[in-house]
Amino acid sequence: MTVHSLRRQNLIPVVLLLCLSCLSLCTYAQGKKKIEKLIQKNMELAARQYKFMASLTPADSMPRTYDAAQDKLVSSDTRWWTSGFFPASLWYIYSYTKDTAIRSEAERRLALEEKEKYLTSNHDVGFMIFCSFGNAYKITHNPDYRDVCAVAAETLIKRYKPSIKAIQSWQALTAPKSPVIIDNMMNLELLNWVSDEWREPKYKAIAIAHANTTIKNHFRADNSSYHVVEYDPATGKVLEKKTAQGYSDESAWARGQAWGLYGYTMMYRFTTEPTYLEQARKIAAFILNHPNLPADGVPYWDFNAPVDKHTLRDASAASIMASALLELAQYTEGAEKTRYISMAEKILTTLSSKTYLAKYRQNGGFLLKHGVGNLPGKSEVDVPLTYGDYYFIEAMLRYKQWYL
Ligand code: GLY
């Protein structure tokens, strides 16, 4: 064997390795291109669908869902917890398209929504006001919108119970039990944001207290969460842990897991407290490693619901998970980060398939089909949901902003 042939032999693995790296870089770039195109197509559809949806929605109401049997959009008044998602989605769509007709519609619906800044009968003011007015402010910098958020934060903390160190979700504050639901983590974004904007620490202090209490009492050893924890308002003692919208008291309701994932990721954004990042990673591990998570990334409505061919998926939980995973990936590195982005890409791809994504002028103008609102309550089962659309749009915009 000559020195030359020896050198040639040594080069073969290096060349092979280079070829493989080039191939995987090409596949990576092609994957990104595919998602980029899909986002462009979906956002163009969103602009057209949401104009159609606006034309079906009475001027004094907000879209809620769609009744396929009667081909009728179902609307609600602004008191319903989902009322803010329509203007909130319109603002997101406007931020992408700069379509002034979409902006005018968003402004009209905001005017209708504004009175809910005083809503004290439950915790949902965060969802209702921050998604709508918070987005409007971030996009337009109109100080009036920022003021509405400040009023809403003051409203929300009226439900804070120092005895529990949490914001009571449901029921009158004088009731003998104080229920706190995992969904409530989402309302903390309003408090954190208002604190930072006004340099007023009291709202964030409440958000932190609530998040800490929720870590202590809502989570099981496997890092899944209960839906509802009921407290004794006098002593702050935990009275009961149970479900309202899940399969059973001990089950992992899919949207609840998604709210927790999103909520703790968001808490880390505002505090850089490692405990919150750790909690979000634990929830992500529960979801991503779960044997009942379908390969296409869209979860069944409850991780513990018995699975057969009739078991429903919840597209809304999938959207929330995709958006949250994209943010969690911002705070992690290496294989873990890649795993979160890949799962979000998978979810977005599945939701963009004809199984889930509606055609123009179908589905009452909603983008996504197959959301599950409250299956045990027989309400909004296998239907479009405004929040499913909202977090789907948000996930696409986050992907575009952070990963393209
Ligand atoms: N309570 C909000 C939800 O149904 O997820």
Image (cartoon, rainbow, N blue to C red):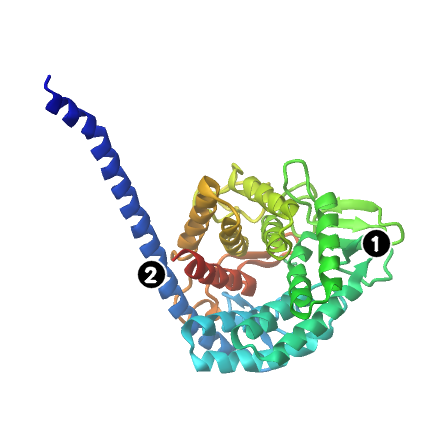
Residue 195 at x, y percent in the picture: 69, 65
Residue 101 at x, y percent in the picture: 45, 82
Q: Residue furthest front?
A: 3
Q: Quadrant of residue 396?
A: bottom left
Q: Circle 1 is placed at which residue position? A: 177
Is residue 69 visible in the rendered image? The answer is: yes
Q: Quadrant of residue 167?
A: bottom right
Q: Is residue 3 left or right of residue 361?
A: left
Q: Is residue 40 left or right of residue 223?
A: left
Q: Earlier in the sequence, mark 2 or mark 1?
A: 2
Instruction: Classify 144 as above or below 250.
Output: below
Is residue 368 visible in the rendered image? The answer is: no
Q: Quadrant of residue 191?
A: bottom right
Amino acid type of the residue tagged 2 in the rendering: Lys
Instruction: Classify 256 as above or below 359.
Output: above
Mark 2: give few (<14), some (14-19) or many (20+) Cα within 10 Å: few
Instruction: Tell me which image quadrant ligand 1 sits in.
Output: bottom right
Instruction: Classify 229 as above or below 169.
Output: above
Amino acid type of the residue tagged 1 in the rendering: Lys
Q: Residue at x 71, y 68 (%)?
A: 153
Q: Circle 2 is placed at which residue position? A: 37
Residue 52 at x, y percent in the picture: 45, 76
Quadrant of the drawing holding the N terminus: top left
- State yes or no: Cβ of the residue under disc 2 lies below 8 Å from any atom of ligand 1: no
The one of 158 and 293 positioned closer to us in this rendering: 158
CA gap, disc 2 and disc 1: 50 Å
Please identify, in this view, whether the residue under mark 2 or under mark 1 is nearer the observer: 2
Mark 1: give few (<14), some (14-19) or many (20+) Cα within 10 Å: many
